[in-house]
Amino acid sequence: MSATGVLFLAISAASLLVAVWLVVRILRDRPVHDALLYALGVLEAGLVLQLVWGVVQVVGAHGDLNVAAYLGYLVGALVILPIGFLWAAAEQNRSGTAVLLVATIAVPVLELRLHDLWVTR
Amino acid sequence: MSTRTTGTGFGRVLVFVYGIFAVAATARSLVQLTTQYDRAPVAYWLSLLSGVVYCLATWAIAKDRRQVALAAVLVELVGVLAVGTWSVLDDGRVFTDATVWSDFGVGYGFIPVVLPFVGLWWLLRGSSHQSD
């Protein structure tokens, strides 16, 4: 598997792990705690890395890649967690946690789109 | 809970989901309209329409504009059912590429056809239980 594929897979898996963790917090009716915030931070660091890596790819040889769509999904994946975090912060209860859950489920979907765009270029 | 607003509680989650679709549909259609317009103009304009409807719904639910939100969600419901049915019957003549609402939103895990029902439930539930 290519380095790009490994990155897509690692970010998707990490995001789904955080999603499961969020589900547990929601079911137990416990607020988001520091450990989860650190996990979200690590995930976001991975998404920053992915954006840098993606820009390097786009600048280099990229075949028939749909560059506008690819960059769009990269930026979307980069901003969805911070926006979700800000939107969730106003309500520190199950609703706020559920917003973060939606964001962490959306990330693997974006990864899948990025993967499809990259392999069909 | 006498002054329940549409953008808090479950509504906060709903706004976020609508927001994702607002960005996804609008961005997708703008990219397609500007880079490959001739491939399927009707489909791309319909995707842009869905994006505008999602933007309006996101804003209205977040800002507790219940009437505007209801109108937007109703347009969304009619849109996804009409475009969904049309795209199924069309047989690839007009819809030479997919829209957000094609085949009832199959490209988005059928969330587009479920979302307006959830939106209606949430908005009407809030209005008929204002004193609970």
Image (cartoon, rainbow, N blue to C red):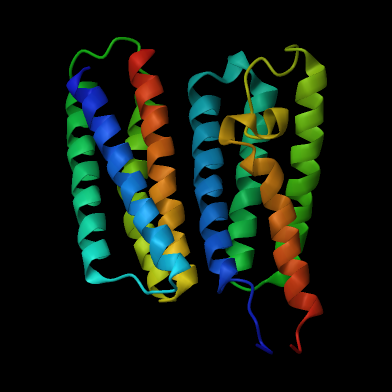
Q: Quadrant of the C terminus of chain B?
A: bottom right
Residue A87 visible? The answer is no
Residue occupying the point 77% across, 49% down: B75
Residue B78, located in which quarter of the rendered image? top right
Across and down, in percent, residue B80 comes to 74, 39
Residue B84 visible? The answer is yes
Q: Quadrant of the N terminus of chain B?
A: bottom right
Across and down, in percent, residue B18 comes to 57, 53
Residue B64, located in which quarter of the rendered image? bottom right
Q: Is residue A6 left or right of residue B31?
A: left
Residue occupying the point 41% across, 52% down: A103
Residue occupying the point 71% across, 52% down: B116
Q: How many marks?
A: 0
Pick the residue in front: B84 or A96: A96
Residue occupying the point 67% across, 71% down: B65
Q: Compared with residue B2, is residue A58 higher up or lower down, i.e. above or below?
A: above
Pick the residue in front: A77 or A58: A77
Q: Is residue B114 left or right of residue B39?
A: right
Q: Is residue A5 left or right of residue B9?
A: left
Across and down, in percent, residue B5 comes to 63, 78
Q: Compared with residue A48, is residue B74 higher up or lower down, i.e. above or below?
A: below
Q: Compared with residue B126, is residue A21 higher up or lower down, i.e. above or below?
A: above
Q: Is residue A1 left or right of residue B117?
A: left
